[in-house]
Image (spheres, helix red, strand yellow):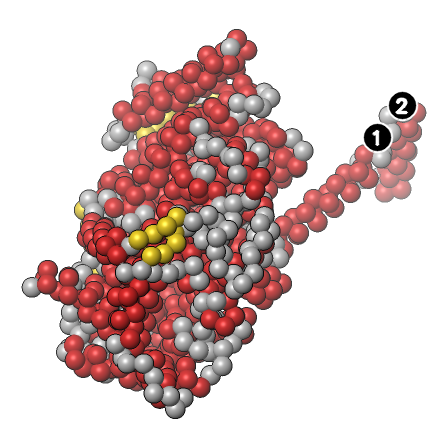
Amino acid sequence: MHIIELIFSPLLALLIGVFFLGLARKVMARIQWRYGPPVTQPLIDIIRLLSQKSASHGVAFNIGLVMSLAGSLVITLFLPFGKIAPMSNSGGMLVILYLMLIGPLGMAISSGESANPNASIGISRKLLLAMGYELPFLLVVLALMTAYNTTSITEIVSLQRDTGWSMFTFPLVLSGIAYLLILPAMLGVRPFEVVNAPQEISSGPLVEYGGPYLALATLQHALAFFIGISLFVNLMWGGAANPVIFFLKMLVVFFLGIFVNAVFPRLRIDQAIRYLWRWPSLIAFAGLILVCVTGS
Amino acid sequence: MTGMEILLLVAFGGVMLTYILGRISSSLRNTFAVVLSLVLVVIIALMYDKTGETIFYRGFFGIPMSFRIDALSWLFAMATSVLGCLSVIFSLSYMSDRKNISFYYSMLFLVNAGMLGVVFSGDLLSFFIFWEIMSWSTFLLISFNRGPAVAAGLKYIIMSIIGSMAMLAGTISLYTNYGTLNIADLSHLTVSASPGYQLFLLIIFGVAFGIKNAVMPLHTWLPDAYTEAPSPFSAVLSGMLTRMGIYGFLLIIYVVVGAARFLHAADSTVSSFNYVLAWLGAITIVIPTFIAMLQNDAKRLLAWHGIGQGGYMILGIAFGTNMGVAGGIFHTLNHAIYIVLLFMSVAAIQYRTGGVRDLNSLGGLIKKMPVAFIGALLGICGLIGVPLTNGFVSKWMIYKTLISGRAPFLAFAALIGSWGTILSVYKFLHNIFLGQLPEKYRDIKQSPFNMKLPIIVLSSTILLFGILPGLPLRVINKIVVSFGFDSLNISLWGIVSESGMLNTINLFAAILAGLIAVWLFFRIGARTIPVKQDDNYAAGAAVPRDRYSYTAKYYDPLFRMISPYLKDIFNTFYMKIADLTGYLSNGIRKIYTGYVGNYVMYIVLFISLMIFVQMKWSPW
């Protein structure tokens, strides 16, 4: 049973992530009064890309990308999906926070070796954006860990079963709001689509990838999307005892993200940091103080 | 003779012998230096798990001087000797074309011997003497390169003397109060000391160790000193020598004052001292890490991280729970490993490029120096604390302590420091090894074997301690128990605490399986063609050769936002004081003109003033 979960949960995460990518294109198309590609289009693209030839810029170019996807796959073992969390005994929230570094870091090393200015600019923006949203995000996570007095994510989820969603419990309200405000930045959708901005910097870090590289990068992107949403649902919307309900909750968050994506124009990177460090950070900071003051 | 006496004899004897042999033949000296440093490692390794104390000299004004060994001193001595040995091996080719090499080696051994003396001192008098030997020989090595290095060395030694004077004052005060300087005796005597006196001791020694460990606001000597010192010595300096401050803090807080007994007492001053120290640690993490982001000099960037990482150690130690102290000590060890590795990677680059360490003029060296790249990559992973590296485990322990100790704001400072670290070290890695290879470095060669060897050893240690943290934690657990804390619940690959556990071997297995799976998946479909670095897509325009300047201001948007807040005000303040002192001293010097006539005039004037005073007020 355990072994099945170990193999099953990364695959499920990949599947849902790719499904979300396809659905996003369809929903965006409908919002813009287009018909749009079929939902399975990203999957078809990945299969096609895997059969194509591509240019390689060196060893780090290959290994960085593999490392990036592997790191993201490992996170899915720690993140509860419904009740499925096969490796939650080996580490909690702190391990997840640190595993989340491997994805961007591997990507950065890989595309850094390609000596393409667009890639370098994209990575610089990615790291800056991460710095921008990590500041409020860490405050939110610390508020949660302090309020529930645990660093285990499964415990945070199971405690919410008694108290209700942490977003709507008293001392965590502010943290919930702050998390909601930074969620688009964490998912990398517009107005925070600065990293991959296709019209400005030719998709940034992705510029040199083609064929199997692009397939891996797409899978990594899908997983990152999955992890961002799943983390929010687990931490703020009480997770779920049942995978189906968990998926429905994720779908709601996904639609929220897409709607934001559809109506906002892209910010500049300095505007994005300024936004993230102003209201979300202040609210998250106030939230942490509130938790400390009201906590036992 | 006991092991410790033999050890110190070998260590100090080697200093002179190295210099004398250097006069005869340089290859003889090099062989001797390597053998000597290996012998030191072996002797210390043989002393594992021993405790004891021997008096080696009775006659110093009736104060006995002694050596002692326990788990704490063994750990620090082991780290010192191993890193010293690697540094000597690394220096063999790095220093080969310099002048005064014999002097360099003998000073390197003197620093090493001084550090060994410090950690094995059984009383505060010998501690002080070895501390001074260590500080002064460090000064000579920092200034080794002349030019700006002399100014950096002077800055170091002046701050170091201020610290030493504070330590001397504390030592004298202890002697007048208790009549002994023996550390073991003092730890029994200070139980009955008043809270005020304990606080006095902690602060006055805290100044000395705070300067050595570069705790903000006493950090200003460090960036210059690390940058200007010869690179293999920068490694020793950042890895061990600066961390003698941590040894000192542990010694004064947990051995001499015995803080584990007071931390939970209501009216104790120790806990408030520790609270302030923890906050200083948090500030020391955040500000230097953000300053590091703005540096363009590879060694200076690492130097600022050296300060920042010192903050983690202070934070862990000052928080005063068993896991926090263990995490602090473990982080000291881990930091030593990865920062030495990083300095060595930079030194390897410097060796091949003719001393270039400006991040904006390097690039693309991964293809030319893969070993240095692996070293730098694992080094920065350790520095960030990526899972499976040693830095992750110790940082995990510190965060865990802070969160379960209900100090989320301290934890926030520590966490955000890690995220700041990523930005600056990625820039470090990218600008040296990734990006475009400049034309002038096209024919660059790999580093020689004796540079690769230390890099490989240290890289594998990073992974070893990250996957099996139980190895060093077993020793560290003994230290923590000897301080009077509860034993930690550790196994070879994991740590269990009251709120959650960490299992590094499972993590390792998962990541390995993930890597293999993705690699296979990638290999099935991949048909790749290797291309040259300028064969890339730039939207119709060619990427210009040798003008890959997109990384010169890598974090410019952030830079413009935060740089006004990141002035090193303390440095400016200290330099103003130094200028003022220089100005005053210059004024005083004008009195000493060198003419006998003037001096006679001063004497006559002084006597007439005295006569006038006596006639007017007749005080005598």
Give the residue at mark 1: B592
Whether residue B204 is visible, yes or no, is no
Please report the residue visible at 51 percent of the width from the left and 14 percent of the height from the top. B26
Please report the residue visible at 56 percent of the width from the left and 57 percent of the height from the top. B542
Q: Position of residue B617 (x, y in %)?
A: 85, 42
The image's mark for residue A1 is none
Q: How dense is the environment of label 2, judged by Cα within 10 Å: few (below 14), some, or many (20 and up)?
A: few
Please report the residue visible at 34 percent of the width from the left and 31 percent of the height from the top. B78
Q: Chain of mark 1?
A: B
Which quarter of the rendered picture does the C terminus of chain A lie within? bottom left
Q: Position of residue B213 (x, y in %)?
A: 48, 43
Mark 2 to mark 1: distance in Å? Answer: 10 Å
Q: Position of residue B151 (x, y in %)?
A: 66, 37
Which quarter of the rendered picture does the N terminus of chain A lie within? bottom left
Whether residue B549 is visible, yes or no, is yes
Give the residue at mark 2: B596
Q: Secondary structure at mark 2?
A: helix
Three-letter code, disc 2:
Val
Q: Quadrant of residue B592?
A: top right
Nearer the observer, A75 or B551: B551
- Answer above or below: position of B315 versus B153: below
